[in-house]
Image: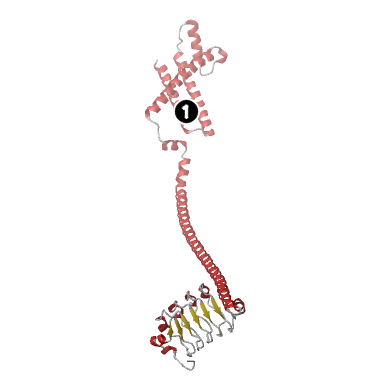
Amino acid sequence: MASKKVDGAALTLKDLKSKLDDNELDLSMHELTVVPVKAMAQLPKATHVDLSTNRLEVLPLDFATSLTHLVKLDLSQNRLVHLPDNFGELRSLAHLDLYRNQLEELPLSFANLRHLKWLDLKDNPLEPALAKAAGDCLDEKQCKTAASRVVAYVQKIQSDHERERQKRLDHERETTTKKQAKEQAEQKEKSAAKKREKENRKQQNTNGKRDAEATHDAATTKASSPKKQNAKERGAHANKKDRPKRSCLGWMCSWLLTLMMMALGVAFLAAFGVYHNCSSREKWLPQSAGLCADLNTLTASGNLPKTAQQNVIKAAEGAKLLLRKKSDEFVHYLQATDYATVALDGWNWICTQTIAAAQWTQKTAIDT
């Protein structure tokens, strides 16, 4: 049978059945370069497969996924340089012979072969750490130990790789998060800059409008200032005319009360002045000397002299002149001290009324 040469790609299901003995399928020493996976997959009964002493360099990707029913697999004395990455799909595998191949390392999925109880990796150019874990497989015990130790070793490598992968993922996630945060910060800064620029333009427009209004107000004020100056130069009387007037009833009551108080005051002062002035000859004034003489004559003899009318007129004239003089002095005083215009107007009115009263007294005396 060793001299028989069979092309693996040409093997049919019928050919495989002819080589099947119970659950063992012997395809050893057939110089196979390709594993007949499709035909073998149709024989789920064949759980023990011998592919030793062939010319296999690689196993196809569908080897592990199509032959998951394998329990014992002999791939010794081939030219395998690596096993497929999904080799761990052979989860039912308990016996594996890889003696004398070209393997340097095992795929990480080898860690999934948790039911593996027997392993031979002798005469392979394994990396030192894997060779140390595999050890020798010279008897049943050593081969069983090799299976458990190699699976544990690959599991550790797988765990380390998983941690590194997770670390890379975390680093990439952190880098992505930082990048996104940076982009968000830049976007936020751009938005804030646009908002500030918009507010600055708005403020500039507001300031421009305010300056324009101020310029307009200044021009208006400058244009109207001569009118205001002329109004100020016209004096207090012009300002008085522009002010709102009180009600007629209020002014009438106020001035009527003032007039009554003045009349009483003038009458009292006149009586007191006449008494004080005419009580002694040394106090007689030139204008009222005749009046005082007539009053003394009237007091002494009970008769009014013929010159009484002329003396009364003369005294009234003197009093009128004296009142005018004093009122003018008071007006000048008010103007000099810049008192309120309304006070000045009131004083002028009082003086006018008083002079009118004096003139009426004079006229009455003349008529009498």
Give the quadrant of the C terminus.
Answer: top left
Q: How is the image coloured?
A: secondary structure
Residue 366 to residue 163: above or below: above
Towards the viewer: 302 or 4: 4
Q: Position of residue 337 (x, y in %)?
A: 54, 33
Q: How many marks?
A: 1
Residue 100 to residue 368: above or below: below
Name the residue furthest front.
Answer: 22
Q: Quadrant of residue 69?
A: bottom left
Instruction: Decide if residue 124 is on the left or right side of residue 218.
Output: right
Q: Which residue is mark 1?
A: 347
Towards the viewer: 285 or 181: 181
Q: Position of residue 163 (x, y in %)?
A: 55, 69
Give the SS element for disc 1: helix
Q: Position of residue 328 (x, y in %)?
A: 50, 29
The amino acid type of the residue labelled 1 equals: Trp
Residue 308 to residue 187: above or below: above
Towards the viewer: 195 or 102: 102
Query: Label 1: how many residues lie within 10 Å, few (<14), some (14-19) or many (20+)?
Result: some
Q: Position of residue 23 (x, y in %)?
A: 44, 80
Name the residue furthest top.
Answer: 301
Name the residue furthest bottom.
Answer: 3
